[in-house]
Image (cartoon, helix red, strand yellow):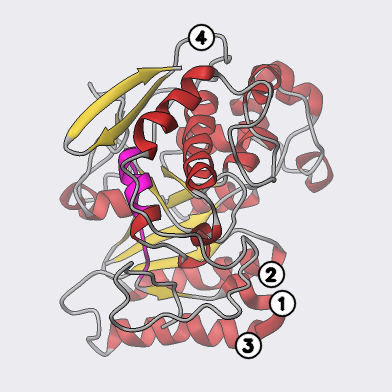
Amino acid sequence: MWSLLTFAAVVAPTMGQAAGGGVAPAALILNPVRECTNYYYPPTAALVKTYPSIWQTANLSGTGIPATDKAIFTQMNSSIPKIAPRGTRDGNFTGVVYSDTDPDCWWSWSTCTYYDYLETMNQKATLFYIGSNVLDWPLEAQRGLADGHELCAHTWSHPYMTALTNEEVFSELYYSKKAILEVTGVTVQCWRPPYGDVDDRVRWIAQALGMRTVMWAEDTSDWKVSTLGVPAVEQNYENILTKSKNGTFANYSPIVLTHELNNLTMELDVMFLPKIQATFNHVMPMGVCMNVTEPYVEQGGKYVYPNAAQWAAGTRTINIQAPTAASSNEAVNIAYKSGTTLNVLST
């Protein structure tokens, strides 16, 4: 089995169709110029003032940040592991040295057209959304859920997380989770660290927010295609296929990382997905592989995915409620874990 993970932003409809028609008609737009035109979406316009600045390191200093958001951080801050931030958000770790016995357990990974294409291939994936992208492209975020993909978070602005303060780590995670909730209607319970950069402090804050930290077993490194070159990334894909054939994955199912970043990464995905499906017995979202049929805080049959056995038998979707965007003046439940107790706070 191959669990398919990807980062998604996809393409955008025109302003008029986005504002008036929502996600369904927007999904029908195929003209690349119209798809990539910015648009105004009223529900998101009402939300954005209550968030940190888009694509800036998230914190709680904004004038529109609700007091209840700040209260959640204040409640957990004294319990966060006392591990100092290291390096910079852009990944400069000059002078930072870690040993194999590092007590902080620091480690980093070193060892819309896309939606349409996945539909033609009858393929679902786990999509890791950046919060800033969700507010920039809300209908594309909704499309991922509506099409039956599994949603997780990928921070607010994609920094190296171990370099941030407690407040910044909290805000990067919290506002990515909140943006996904308020734009799509689902409260995600998983996230992927940018660059694989995570330590016990960051993991603790994520767990306190009810978010499992997800890492990968195989990286296509497609995100580095501009520096590695296409042949090198193609070889990375081929190496993973070879491992499937030679028995490397006989006792486990690898989580494989790909990115929807640009034309190059998408061309590679289009080239290799048929080969991947032909080589692996099953290619499925992470939650499906783990038999998590209701991956969101929202339970009761609203968002139900197949389990691994159902997927293997050909079922791709059980029940997915239509995505909905909620304005910031409405009560929104943000679930998070504090120790072993699950608390739900209203913001």
Comparing marks 1 and 4, which lies closer to the viewer? 4
Q: Nearer the viewer, residue 328 or 274?
A: 328
Mark 1–mark 4 distance (CA, rounded to whole Å): 43 Å
Q: Quadrant of the N terminus?
A: bottom left
Q: Which SS class for mark 1?
A: helix
- Amino acid type, callout 2: Leu
Mark 2–mark 1 distance (CA, rounded to whole Å): 8 Å
Q: Residue at x 72, y 25 (%)?
A: 18
Q: Earlier in the sequence, mark 1 or mark 3?
A: 1
Q: Which SS class for mark 2?
A: helix
**Callout 3 touching callout 4 (CB < 8 Å):** no
Say whether residue 42 is left or right of residue 232. Answer: right
Depicted 306 relative to depicted 99: above or below: above
- Asked where in the image residue 135 lies, by quadrant, the reply is top right
**Callout 2 touching callout 1 (CB < 8 Å):** yes
User: Which mark is drawn over residue 260?
Assistant: none
Comparing marks 2 and 1, which lies closer to the viewer? 1
- Amino acid type, callout 4: Glu
- Asked where in the image residue 186 lies, by quadrant, the reply is top left
Depicted 185 relative to depicted 108: above or below: above
Q: Residue at x 65, y 27 (%)?
A: 25
Residue 34: give x, y in percent of width and height.
Answer: 81, 39
**Callout 1 touching callout 3 (CB < 8 Å):** no
Residue 89: give x, y in percent of width and height.
Answer: 62, 60
Q: Which residues are magenta?
A: 203-216
Q: Which residue is mark 3?
A: 231
Q: Which residue is mark 2?
A: 264
**Residue 213 magenta:** yes
